[in-house]
Amino acid sequence: MSKKSKLLGNIGNFAVFAGPSVITFTCVLLVPLIYGVYLTFTNYSPIRITYDFVGFSNFKSVFTDKEFWQQFVKTLGYVFYSTVFCNLLAFLLAYLLTGNIKARDFLRAGFFTPNLIGGIVLGYIWKFIFANVVTKLGDILGYQPLMTSFLTHPDRAIVAMIIVTVWQYAGYLMIIYIAGFVGIPQDVQEASEIDGATGLRKLYSITIPLMVPSFIICFFIMISRGFMTYDLNLALTNGQPYGSTRLAAMHIYQKAFQANEYGIGQAEAIIFFITVAVAAVSQVLLTKRFEVEA
Amino acid sequence: MKNKLLVLLLVLTVFSLTACGGNTTGTPATGDNASSNVDASGKSNAPKTVKITYFNTSAEVNTMFENMFKRYNELYPNVIIELIPTGIGEGQQEKLQSLYASGNAPTFMNVDPANVIEYQDHLLEFTEENAPWLSLATDGAVDGGTFGGKVLGAPWSVQGYGLLYNKRVVDEIFGKGNFDPTSIKTRDALKEFFEKCEAAGVPATMLHGANWSLGGHYLTLVYAVQGPKTSDGTGFIDKIKSGEINIEDSPIFQGYMDTFDLLAKYNYNKADPLVGDFSRDVQAFGEGKCATYFMGDWLWTTMVTLENVDQEYGFIPVPWSNDPNAYGNSEVVMVLPKFQCINKSQNTPEQQQAALEALRWMLTEPEGQQFFLDAGFYMPYKNVRDDITYNSMTTSISEYAQRGKTINLGCFSYISGDAWTETGNLMLKYLSGAITRDELAKGINNYWRSVNR
C-alpha cells in the first residue's frame, strides 16, 4: 500500500463519515458568517435594490448606539445570575437525588421535564403565571410587591426571566451533575471517610474537585445559552416593559429588522459573537486548570 | 470493500433524500420561487398551476383569508394561494423583511401604508390596463394608496378609532337613551362623563398597555389634528425632524397629553397598566367591566368570537381642548389602514397576473366581497351590496363620516415602520409614571431626529 493511496483512503473515510456534517456546517454557519462580515462594510437592506460600500461607518455607529451597550450590560448581568443560580440549584438537586431515596428516578424525571418544554411555550405559560397567578397570590396574601405583575417593572422583569431560565435548565444541568457524582470512584470516598472526613469536608475536598469536568460543561452550557437567549425573551417579555428587557440578541434583531438598519445590526452581531466566543472559551480554559485525577 | 460500498450507498441516499425535500429558496435577482408545479401538469394545453403567497398583517382575520383562499381555489383550481399569517402586533415588520431578504417575498400582501412606501421599488403599479376594476373604488380611497403618483396599494377596508363605549353600560348609568355621544366635544365634558361613570361604580375607561395602541394610535392624533390635510401632519413631523420646532411647543400635544392623564386616571387597568393582555382587556370590555375603551372598530372581529359579551357599542371623540369648535374635538379617526399590494421584484409575470386576478375577485366580486363583509369590514367600493347592516362599531364610524366629522389620518402612512414601537414604548413609560411629560417630549423629539427616519 503506497503512501498516496493510504492518504486518499483516509480522506475517503473522512468524506464518507464527516462529509455531510462538514458540508452542512459550511453552508449553514460558515458561509452566512463570512457573507455577514462582508455585508457589514456595505449599506445593504432588502428594501434597497442595489447597495454600496461604506467602509467602517457601521462599526462607528455601533459605538454610538447607547442602547446596545446598556442592553449588553443587562445581558451580562442576566447571564451571570442565571448561570450561578442555575448551577447552584442543579448541584443541590443532583446531590440530593444521588443517594438512595424513594422515588428517586421519578423525581429526576420530574425535575428534567421543564427542559423539554420549548422556550416559546414556556414563555407564554410563565407570562400567564406572572400576570395572573402570582398577582392573585399577592391579593390573597395581601403582599404588595406581588400584587402587580413581575413583568411590568423593568427590574423585576429581568428577575422574572432569570427565574424562568433557572427553572428551565436546572433539570438539564442536574442530569449532568448526577452523571458526575456517579462517576466518582467509591474507594476514594471510602478512604476519606476512614480518615475521618465529615460530609461537608468530603464534599469540599473530594467531590467538588473530582466534579470539575461537569462544572466546566455546565458553566459553558449556561453561559453560551444565556447569551443567545431569544425565544424565551420574545415569549415572556417581548422587550417589555417599554423595551427595557430587550436582551442583546433581541436588540440586534430589532435593529436589523425593525429599524431597518441592517449594517449596524450585523456589526453588533459580530461584536456580540466575538464576546460570547471569548467568554465561553476563556471560561473553559480557566476552569480546566482545576481538573484533578482521582 | 463491500462494507465501504454499502456505507457510500447509504450516504448518497441520505443526500438525495435531503435534496428532494423542501421548496426552492430563490435569489433576489432571479425571482426563482416560481410555480413549483409548472412542469408537473404535463400537457401543454392544460392550465399551469400557479402557486402564490399572501402575507397578511391584519392578524385578527387570518381565518377569514384562509377560508377566502380555499373558496378561490375551488373556483379556480389552477391557482393555489398560500397564506402567510402573523400575530397581533407581533413581529410583522421583521417577518416581512426576512421574507424579502431571503428572496421569498410574498406575491401579494396586506400591509400598512408605511410598508407600501418602504417597499415601493418592489411593488407593481396598478394601472388602467392591468387593474381596470380599481375604478370601482370610491373617490379618495385610491388616493390613499397612491404614492409618488403611482397607485401601489389597492384599498379594501375603512376603519376608525376613538373612545369606544359600551351602550348597555352607559344606558344603565345615564338612563336608557339619555346619553348623546355628540355632546362630548370638550375635555371638561369628557371629565364629567367619566366622573358620572365612577360615581355609578363603573371604571370609566380602559387603556390597552401596548406600544401600538398608545404610540401608533394615540400619539398619531397629535400629528393628524395639526390640520385637515395629510401635508399638515407630515409637515409638522418634518419640522420636528429638522429641529425647527419641538413637539412640546405644540398646544395640541399638550392638550392630548392632558387628556391622556385623564384617561390614565380612570384607567380600568390602573393597578398594573402595562400588562397589555389583549384577550383579557377585550373580555373585560365586552362584559361591561368598564364604560369606554380607547380602541378601534377592528375590535369587533375579536369581540364576535367571545361568548356572553355585549353587542352594542358606539364611539365618542377624544377631545384635546375645551374649545368645542376645534378640529379633533368632535371627530373620530377614519383611516384606510391597510392596502393590498403586489410584488414585482421577486416573482414571475404569471404569478403577478394570478395575484391581480385574485385581488379583482376579492375586492370587486360579490362573492369575494362577502367574506370581508361577514367579518364586519367596511369596503370603499361602489358595487358593494347596499342591503348590508354593519356591526354597531362600524355603523358608529360611518355615522361620523356621514356628518363629515372625521379626522384624516393620512400622515400615518408616512410614518416609518418602527415609530409606533419606539414612541409607543415612551408612552408606556409615561403611562406607568417612569418618566415625566418633558422627558416624553424629549424622547419623541430624539426619535424623529435620529438616523434613518
Image (tube, coloured by chain):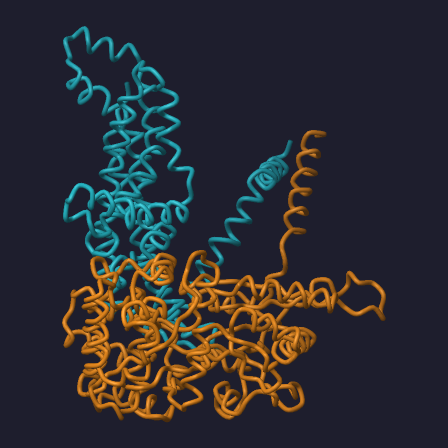
Q: Residue at x 32, y 84 (%)?
A: B182
Describe residue A281's horizontal placement relative to residue A39 as left or right.
left
What is the letter of the cyan chain?
Answer: A
Q: Residue B286's quadrant in the figure?
A: bottom left
Assign the C terminus of chain B to one quadrant of the image: bottom left
What is the letter of the orange chain?
Answer: B
Q: Nearer the viewer, residue A122 or B450?
A: A122
Q: Residue at x 15, y 12 (%)?
A: A197
Q: Residue B252's quadrant in the figure?
A: bottom left
Where residue A106 appears, as percent x and y from the top left, is 39, 22
Q: Is residue B57 at all visible to an observer of this figure?
A: yes
Q: Is residue A51 at all visible to an observer of this figure?
A: no
Vertical position of residue B216 compared to residue A98: above or below: below
Number of numbered markers: 0
Vertical position of residue A103 compared to residue B24: above or below: above
Q: Residue B328's quadrant in the figure?
A: bottom left
Assign the N terminus of chain B to one quadrant of the image: top right
Vertical position of residue B180 compared to residue B81: above or below: below
Q: Nearer the viewer, residue A201 or B371?
A: B371
Describe residue B94's horizontal placement relative to residue A97 as left or right.
right
Q: Residue at x 70, y 75 (%)?
A: B350
Q: Nearer the viewer, residue A115 or B247?
A: B247
Vertical position of residue B140 compared to residue B440: above or below: below
Where residue B413 appears, as percent x and y from the top left, is 41, 82
Where residue B129 appears, as percent x and y from the top left, is 67, 89
Where residue A257 appears, as percent x and y from the top left, is 40, 67
Q: Residue furthest top?
A: A194
Q: Nearer the viewer, residue A127 or A227?
A: A127
Q: Residue at x 27, y 93 (%)?
A: B325
